Amino acid sequence: MSDAVIHMMERITIRLPSQQVAMLEKFVEAGEYPTVSEAVRHAVRELIEKHSERVQKDSEQISFEV
């Protein structure tokens, strides 16, 4: 990852159950992802893609109701 991309990212802290952390580490060990951070970024991207349209619609409805 380039320095420019890293500088565009924000750092957050999350707490996960140890079983989930262990599974993320297994993904890295198996070569699925280069780092645990990249595995989490991938999961977040998928979550956003899956739910973003519905969330956008919900937020637009809220703004029209005011």
Image (spheres, helix red, strand yellow):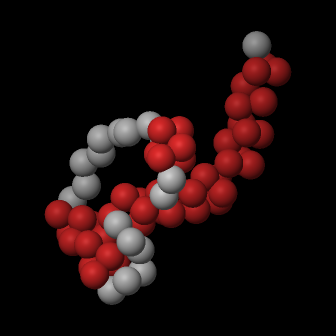
The quadrant holding residue 10 is top left
**For residue 35, above or below residue 59:** below
Q: Quadrant of the C terminus?
A: top right
Left or right position of 48 against 60 = left
Which residue reaches farthest bottom?
30
Name which residue lies at 32% across and 76% down.
28
Task: Decide which of 65, 36 is in the foreground and name it.
Answer: 36
Left or right position of 51 against 56 = left
The quadrant holding residue 56 is top right
Task: Decide which of 3, 39 is in the foreground and name it.
Answer: 3
Task: Decide which of 11, 47 is in the foreground and name it.
Answer: 11
Which percent across, then down, holds residue 32?
Answer: 42, 80
Which percent across, then down, holds residue 9?
Answer: 48, 41
**For residue 52, above or below residue 1:** above
**For residue 21, above or below residue 60:** below
Which residue reaches farthest left?
18
Task: Decide which of 57, 21 is in the foreground and name it.
Answer: 21
Name which residue lies at 30% across and 41% down.
13
